[in-house]
Amino acid sequence: MELLGKEINDCQCGKTHKLIPEHIIINENALKELPKLAIKSVSGDQTKRKVLILYDIRTLTIAGKRVANEFKEAGWQVFEEMVPDPNEMQVPKCDDKTHAILSAKVPIIDVIIPVGSGVLSDLGKWLAFERKVPFLTFATAASMNGYTSANVAPSINGVKSLVHAVPPYAVVSEPQVLSNAPHEMTVAGLGDVLAKSVSSLDWLLNNLLFNDYYCARSVGLITDIEPLYLEQSHRIATHDPQAIVAMTNALMLTGVAMTMAGTSAPASGGEHLISHSLDIMSAIDGHPHDFHGRQVGVATCMMAALYEKVIQISDSPVLYDPPFEIDKDFWGPVADEVQSKYKEKLPRLHIAKNLLAQPGFWPKVKKQLSTMHRSPDIIRSCLTNANGATNFSNLNINRNRLRLALEHAHQMRARFTVLDLAYIFGIFPNYIDDLIDDWAT
Ligand SMILES: [Zn+2]
Ligand SMILES: [Zn+2]
């Protein structure tokens, strides 16, 4: 945390890194610090004292009102905007419609303070980026790693999209607020932070196979605090503030690592593709999906097991041609989009197969992967102890739905992951059933 806001010039990866946000503050007094931090975010400019506080009906009472009062007391001109629920059954969404309404309503302001979790944080980030003003987020749940990242993931015309914005100047929260958040949200955050154990392996795999950029330092960013939630996850089940703060810090640093690396690769690999596939299946057939991080957690456990299986493959592996086509019937209305991404990946699949056929290549790759591999037992017991989702029933889906997601997830993005490796080694699709039986049932 002490490196935040600073520049790293001596990284072995060759890049100069700037670690942003400038501040991540989670303590009892964090909320009171917001006006001071906001002044810093506008470089002390006295003429800039108009702040917008963004909240919804829930986060208004959790912290929104208190944040607004704090700014009023500090002499700011305060504008408050409540993002409405679309209907009685739903919470706000980060989509083009909500964004357009907000854009039209919000006057000229100098700083934006979103108070909430994923959706509010993204809406504030998006608006701040468009208005070219700084924003500082008050996080109300440790539910995902997006707070500190530069990206917004809105739904545009009903399709999940990506807007490259900028990270917040600061993220703050209070331990009590985080530990009072709904349990489902906290264990979703745990799933998202655990994903790093397999996503960073996927990133390393791309480096070893294709010589892609890789930065070990950004992977190691959360190593020091990992034991605080990995070994004490039972304390997350009881909402112990100290354990939840440790996990939140890890989530925040995962976002920092993505910005540092200039790619989401350190935090998003095959396990995320499985969760994204489940989301797309929901968009197609209307069956609800679970929280992102809960799906990611279950998938992380399976991908750790898949890596374990892959690492056991002999030094002279038998190789198979990866599938040339995507399953258009499965992807339905998004088939063309999925197809174009998969086409981008096809050359890599062939390069990978050729490299793996070279004598001595696979043993070297395998050795490097195994030094970083974490056993699926650790992931599962961590999720179990925290009382999180560990199987398909917990995610409110049936076995076949998870099976379909596992079988098709490798088709949906250009990024090479362990799922592709599993097809090249001929482990997939046959091993999918065992994987579900052993690690997600
Ligand atoms: Zn680096
Ligand atoms: Zn995630």
Image (cartoon, rainbow, N blue to C red):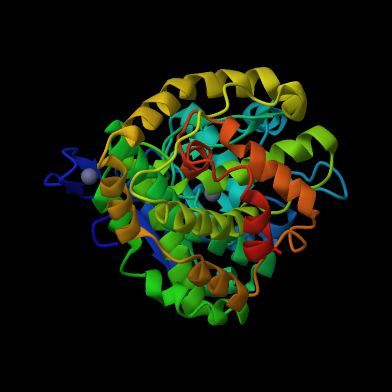
Q: Residue 17, located in which quarter of the rendered image?
A: top left
Image spot of residue 325 (x, y percent): 61, 21
Q: Looking at the picture, how far across and down is residue 246, in whole percent?
A: 43, 71
Q: Is residue 304 above or below residue 177?
A: above
**Residue shown at 42%/62% (left/top)?**
250
* Screen quadrant of the N terminus: bottom left
Relative to residue 139, is residue 267 depicted above or below? above
Side of 166 where 398 appears, left or right: right
Q: Is residue 119 visible?
A: yes
Residue 300 lies left or right of residue 205; in this view the side is right
Name the foreground residue: 113 vs 146. Answer: 146
Q: Position of residue 64 (x, y in %)?
A: 62, 58
Measured as percent of width and height from the top left, residue 191 is found at 56, 60
In the rendered image, the quadrant that contains the C terminus is: bottom right
- Residue at (52%, 44%) from the top-left corner? 270
Residue displayed at 43% across by 30% down: 132
- The residue positioned 58% from the left and 59% from the top of the image is 297
Q: Is residue 80 visible to the viewer in this orientation of the structure?
A: no
